Amino acid sequence: MSTQYRLLERQEIGAECKLRASGGLARTAIVANLTNEGCMVECIPTSLQRGDTVYLQFGKVGPIMAEVIWLRKGVSAGLRFENALHPAVFDRLVHVAHRSMILGLETGEPNYAPRPALRAVC
């Protein structure tokens, strides 16, 4: 039995982003957690398939190209970024998300939503 170990700590952020599948329209999705190399998104299109290429936009940051590695059809997906996020970009996204959630701020930066206690119905 093979065991995979994650090398990077995941940051829970609950941030809104725009997600666009190749050839599709952008729609709002929730980034549940984030590492430099990928993320888990919720509220995904039901048409998304494993292996698809998608583009994420966090406010002014992006587009970030990623591949769908795993998915729960129409619910959530694991994405691997084509290029790892620069540490400064990663830190900024996490900082703004956490600050926004704690203070309930509306920022002009990426539009962050608090992570719901229950999974969103999309």
Image (cartoon, rainbow, N blue to C red):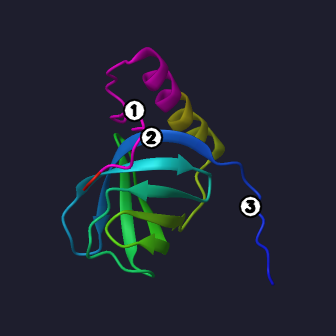
Sequence-first disc among 1 and 2: 2
Along the viewing direction, whichever of 61 and 28 lies nearer the viewer: 28
- 22 magenta-colored: no
Q: Which residues fall within the magenta stretch?
A: 96-120
User: Predominant secondary structure in magenta?
Assistant: loop
Determine which residue is flagged by label 1. Answer: 114
Determine which residue is flagged by label 2. Answer: 14
Q: How many tags in the picture?
A: 3
Residue at x-position 38% and y-position 49%: 119
Along the viewing direction, whichever of 30 and 108 lies nearer the viewer: 30
Q: Which mark is residue 6?
A: 3
Residue at x-position 65% and y-position 44%: 87
- Quarter of the picture containing the C terminus is bottom left
Occupied quadrant, residue 38: bottom right
Q: Is mark 1 on a helix, strand or loop?
A: loop
Query: Farthest residue toward the front?
Result: 118
Amino acid type, mark 1: Pro
